[in-house]
Amino acid sequence: MTIESTLILGEHLTKESFVEYLKKVGKIIGEPELAECRMIYNEESRARVDINLLTGDSCCFEQDELDEYEKLLGTAPLSFIELSFFSEVGSTDLGIQFTKALNSLIPVVLDTGFDKVFSPNEIPSLTAEQAY
């Protein structure tokens, strides 16, 4: 089963700046190859999270969602990162770990896809159980 969530940023990310953020997050979470593989994998649990920058037609949001993101970010949403969770055990923990690390570098909003949206201020104390 795959679960998808979206991270919303108030900064326009190019492919190059996305890779730079992945390098920084990789250092924070101990995944030095994150920028190259664009995924986090836990061998023990076989949990995996794929991380992709959404562009063009892949960014389909309703206006009310965009308004909510802007309210939480304090600025217009300009970039979207999709997190795809594979494996029911442990993948959400990996996704929260990534989200917290990225949020420590740039404010993000987390939309879990389950009618739960978390502001940058809520993310530092967020657990996988709360989000999913």
Image: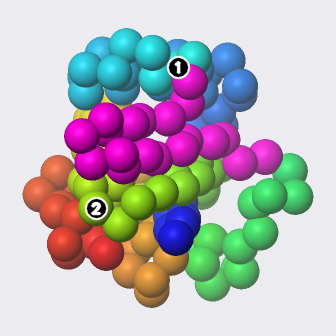
Of residues 4 and 125, the one drawn nearer to the viewer in this rendering: 4
Q: Considering the numbered disc 2 on the image, is that residue within a helix, a strand or a loop? A: loop
Q: For mark 2, what is the residue?
A: 89
Please state the horizontal and vertical placement of residue 54, each as a whole percent of the image: 71, 48
Instruction: Indicate yes or no whether the magenta region holds residue 123.
Output: no
* Callout 2 crowding tier (Cα within 10 Å): few <14, some 14–19, many ≥20: few
Give the residue at x 62% y 71%: 66
Residue type at the position of mark 2:
Val
| Amino acid on which the number 1 mark rests in the picture | Ala
Disc assigned to residue 35: 1
Q: Left or right: where does residue 127 sit relative to residue 108?
A: left
- The answer to whether residue 50 is left or right of residue 127 is right
Q: Which mark is residue 6?
A: none
Which quadrant would residue 112 be assigned to in this image?
A: bottom left
Q: Quadrant of the C terminus?
A: bottom left
Vertically, is 38 above or below 6?
Answer: above
User: Separation of disc 1 and disc 2 at Cα?
Assistant: 24 Å
Q: Residue at x 24, y 40 (%)?
A: 44
Inspect the magenta stretch and tell me whether residue 43 lies in it. yes
Which segment is the magenta one?
37-55
First of labels 1, 2 by sequence position: 1
Count of numbered circles on the image:
2
Whether residue 66 is situated above or below residue 74 in the rendered picture: below
Location of residue 40 by image quarter? top left
Horizontally, residue 2 falls left or right of residue 33, namely right
Q: Is residue 69 visible?
A: no
- Circle nearer the viewer, 1 or 2: 2
